[in-house]
Image (tube, rainbow, N blue to C red):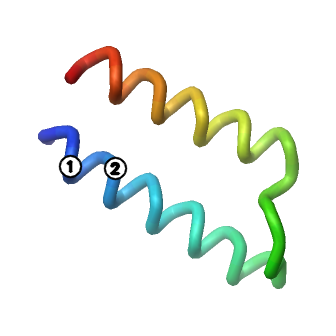
Protein backbone atom coordinates (compact mmCIF):
# COMPACT_ATOMS: atom_id res chain seq x y z
CA UNK A 1 0.00 0.00 0.00
CA UNK A 2 1.18 3.48 -0.66
CA UNK A 3 1.43 6.14 2.02
CA UNK A 4 -1.76 7.89 0.96
CA UNK A 5 -3.79 4.69 1.31
CA UNK A 6 -2.30 3.91 4.71
CA UNK A 7 -3.06 7.44 5.92
CA UNK A 8 -6.65 7.17 4.75
CA UNK A 9 -7.08 3.83 6.53
CA UNK A 10 -5.48 5.17 9.71
CA UNK A 11 -7.75 8.21 9.75
CA UNK A 12 -10.84 6.09 9.08
CA UNK A 13 -9.96 3.74 11.94
CA UNK A 14 -9.54 6.69 14.30
CA UNK A 15 -12.88 8.19 13.26
CA UNK A 16 -14.67 4.86 13.63
CA UNK A 17 -13.18 4.29 17.08
CA UNK A 18 -14.34 7.71 18.21
CA UNK A 19 -17.82 7.11 16.85
CA UNK A 20 -18.16 3.57 18.20
CA UNK A 21 -16.87 4.57 21.62
CA UNK A 22 -19.23 7.54 21.75
CA UNK A 23 -16.39 10.02 21.97
CA UNK A 24 -16.62 13.46 20.42
CA UNK A 25 -13.28 14.36 21.89
CA UNK A 26 -9.78 12.95 21.56
CA UNK A 27 -9.10 9.23 21.72
CA UNK A 28 -7.86 7.68 24.95
CA UNK A 29 -4.12 8.13 25.35
CA UNK A 30 -3.26 4.50 24.59
CA UNK A 31 -5.21 4.46 21.33
CA UNK A 32 -3.83 7.86 20.30
CA UNK A 33 -0.33 6.56 21.02
CA UNK A 34 -0.90 3.55 18.78
CA UNK A 35 -2.18 5.74 15.96
CA UNK A 36 0.82 8.03 16.39
CA UNK A 37 3.16 5.05 16.13
CA UNK A 38 1.40 3.96 12.95
CA UNK A 39 1.77 7.47 11.53
CA UNK A 40 5.50 7.50 12.38
CA UNK A 41 6.05 4.12 10.72
CA UNK A 42 4.23 5.35 7.65
CA UNK A 43 6.40 8.47 7.48
CA UNK A 44 9.58 6.41 7.89
CA UNK A 45 8.57 4.22 4.94
CA UNK A 46 7.83 7.22 2.70
* Crowding at mark 2 (Cα within 10 Å: few <14, some 14-19, many 20+): some
* Crowding at mark 1 (Cα within 10 Å: few <14, some 14-19, many 20+): few
Q: Nearer the viewer, residue 30 or 36?
A: 36
Task: From the top left corner, tell me how far across and down residue 36 is, in percent.
Answer: 60, 35
Q: Residue at x 65, y 36 (%)?
A: 34
Q: Secondary structure at mark 1?
A: helix
State which quarter of the image contains the C terminus. Answer: top left
Task: From the top left corner, tell me how far across and down residue 6 is, in percent.
Answer: 29, 46
Q: Which residue is mark 2?
A: 7
Contact (Cβ within 8 Å) of mark 2 with mark 1: yes
Measure how far apart labels 2 and 1 are at the Cα level: 5 Å
Q: Is residue 29 left or right of residue 4?
A: right
Q: Residue at x 80, y 62 (%)?
A: 26
Q: Residue at x 32, y 59 (%)?
A: 8
Q: Is residue 4 left or right of residue 27?
A: left
Q: Quadrant of residue 27?
A: bottom right
Q: Which residue is mark 1?
A: 4
Furthest residue toward top: 44
Task: From the top left corner, tell me how far across and down residue 22 is, in percent.
Answer: 82, 84
Q: Which numbered circle lies on residue 25?
A: none
In the picture shown, does residue 30 fall above or below 28? above
Q: Is residue 5 left or right of residue 13?
A: left
Q: Quadrant of residue 3?
A: top left
Q: Secondary structure at mark 2?
A: helix
Task: From the top left corner, tell me how far across and down residue 25 is, in percent.
Answer: 83, 72
State which quarter of the image contains the N terminus. Answer: top left
Amino acid sequence: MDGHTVAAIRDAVGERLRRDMGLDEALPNHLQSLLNRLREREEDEA
